Amino acid sequence: MKYIGLIIATFFIFVCLFFALNKKEQTLKSPLLNKPIPEINLNSLKNGKLNNIDFKNEVLLVNFFASWCVPCIVEHDFLFELKKQKPIKIYGINYKDDIKNLKIWLEKLGNPYSKIGIDETGITGINWGVNGIPESFLIDQNGIIRHKISGVIDEKQIKILLSKIELIEK
Amino acid sequence: MKKILILIILIFFSQNIFADENLDKKAREINKKIRCVVCQSQSIDDSDSILARDLRLLIKEKLEEGKNEKEITDYLVERYGEFILLKPRFNSNTYFLWLAPIIIIIFGFFLIKGIFKKN
């Protein structure tokens, strides 16, 4: 009976630890959410540039990818599926890649991107707070980041994206 | 005349070398405080990941541009959140983290005191 306080305190600490370590969502929210897109000024794969001017008046998706990234191959088909379900623009940002390999990759798997910016140095990735690829950002008509997906866009993520797009367009 | 010229050149280069060394030292000091977001339990100074290497380069570039430590860490926190700092700042989101050990120690002190009193 005299150790009841100690037992309660120990139990409390274990309960806290249990809930802290059992959180379903282990990825942290990006501090860039609901803020304007960071500065972007990249050479495009085809002639021209991909910069902030391209992010106006329409909802679009920005997808960081590379030909050396294995999960990006899995994601590629889902990008086509997303476009089938909702024809939105997808801008690709090719992260630290070899252009030759990128072109072969796109020829082989198809090109779901409206524009591809080349992030040769990875600085744009850091500017956008990218941890690893693939990573995607949903941008609204005013150039505000509304949603971030860390990892592969799959069936489940497409559903989430579609509901977010619907909310933005309302 | 020749000797004076050599001396001037030597002084000029040695100043540049010392400036570079100071910049490297400062960069490493900052690197040690920044978490590698890919490996998480390491600083970018210890990590070999691509992102850690890019962040090290960026920090050095920002120092060369004349940015100070606060400006550089603010830039990184704006993009990756407080999580990128190995030692989180004391603010409204982290005060519990900082104060919890003190609260637990005080609680433990009174608990033990209570137990000894009863005995």
Image (cartoon, coloured by chain):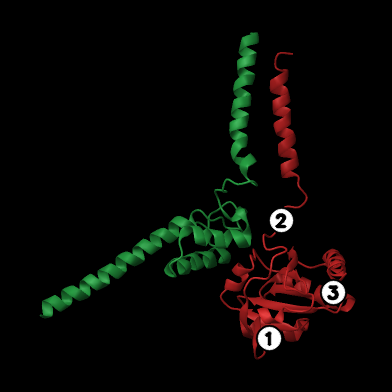
Chain colours: A red, B green
In the rendered structure, the residue with mark 3 lies on which chain? A
Judging by the rendered image, the residue that carries numbered circle 3 is A82
Residue at (65, 9) in percent of width and height: B118
Q: How far apart, in angstroms, are the residues tagged by discs 1 and 3?
A: 22 Å
Q: Position of residue A117 (x, y in %)?
A: 66, 81
Q: Is residue B46 visible?
A: yes
Quadrant of the drawing holding the C terminus of chain B: top right
Judging by the rendered image, the residue that carries numbered circle 1 is A103
Q: Residue furthest top?
A: B119
Q: Position of residue B106 (x, y in %)?
A: 60, 26
In the rendered structure, the residue with mark 2 lies on which chain? A
Query: In screen coordinates, is A41 left or right of B70?
Result: right
Q: Earlier in the sequence, mark 3 or mark 2?
A: 2
From the viewer's perspective, is residue B27 above or below residue A110?
A: above
Q: Is disc 1 in the same subunit as disc 3?
A: yes
Residue at (74, 13) in percent of width and height: A1
Q: Earlier in the sequence, mark 1 or mark 2?
A: 2
Give the amino acid type for the residue marked by disc 1 in the picture. Lys
Give the amino acid type for the residue marked by disc 3 in the picture. Leu
**Of helix, strand and loop, which one carries label 3?**
helix
Residue at (44, 58) in percent of width and height: B28
In the rendered structure, the residue with mark 1 lies on which chain? A
Query: In screen coordinates, is B31 left or right of A123?
Result: left
Give the amino acid type for the residue marked by disc 2 in the picture. Thr
Quadrant of the drawing holding the N terminus of chain B: bottom left
Q: How far apart, in angstroms, are the residues tagged by discs 3 and 2?
A: 23 Å
Q: Position of residue A128 (x, y in %)?
A: 64, 68
Q: Are marks 3 and 2 in contact (CB under 8 Å)?
A: no
Crowding near the residue tagged with mark 3, few <14, some 14–19, many ≥20 C-alpha atoms within 10 Å: many
